[in-house]
Amino acid sequence: MVMKSHKKVKELTGGKIQLTEGALYPTLHALEAQGILTTEVVNVGNRLRKYYTVTSSGKLMADEKVNEFSDFMNTMIFLLDLKPKMGKA
């Protein structure tokens, strides 16, 4: 069974991130137009399904963004003198 992308995100994040189809698909189309994603259209039971794959340049960009975010978080932890906590409080 193929799960819709927005449902998969909700499941993987324990409901902390919930995407709407109205937000998800325009974003996917924009990422495709930028060359970050490629698509494959497959006929499944008389329905066309579109599968998205991250390109190699998309993976590089994702790595850069994750590193930028990590640097930002480390800076905020330092500035606020926070000690990271493991698990739930």
Image: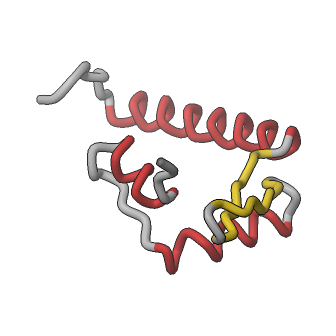
Decide if residue 46 is on the left or right side of residue 57. Answer: left
Residue found at x 65% / y 70%:
46
Q: Residue furthest front?
A: 45
* Rendered position, 70 above or below 22: above
Q: Is residue 65 above or below residue 15?
A: above
Query: Residue 11, position in %: x, y?
Result: 34, 46
Locate residue 49: give its quadrant. Answer: bottom right
- Residue at the spot 42% in from the left edge and 28% down from the top edge: 78
Q: Residue at x 79, y 58 (%)?
A: 39
- Front one among 24 and 71: 24
Q: Residue 64's image quarter?
A: top right
Question: Residue 33 at what x, y percent from top left?
Answer: 85, 69
The quadrant in which residue 7 appears is: bottom left
Q: How is the image coloured?
A: secondary structure
Q: Is residue 56 toward the left or the right of residue 20 in the image?
A: right
Answer left or right for 40 relative to 69: right
Relative placement, left or right, of 44 versus 32 is left
Q: Is residue 32 above or below residue 12?
A: below
Residue 37, position in %: x, y? 79, 54
* Residue depicted at x 27% and y 52%: 15
Pick out the residue farthest to the left. Answer: 89
Which part of the image, by quadrant, shows the C terminus? Answer: top left
Query: Which residue is more in the foreground, 87 or 77?
Result: 87
Q: Position of residue 8 (x, y in %)?
A: 43, 50
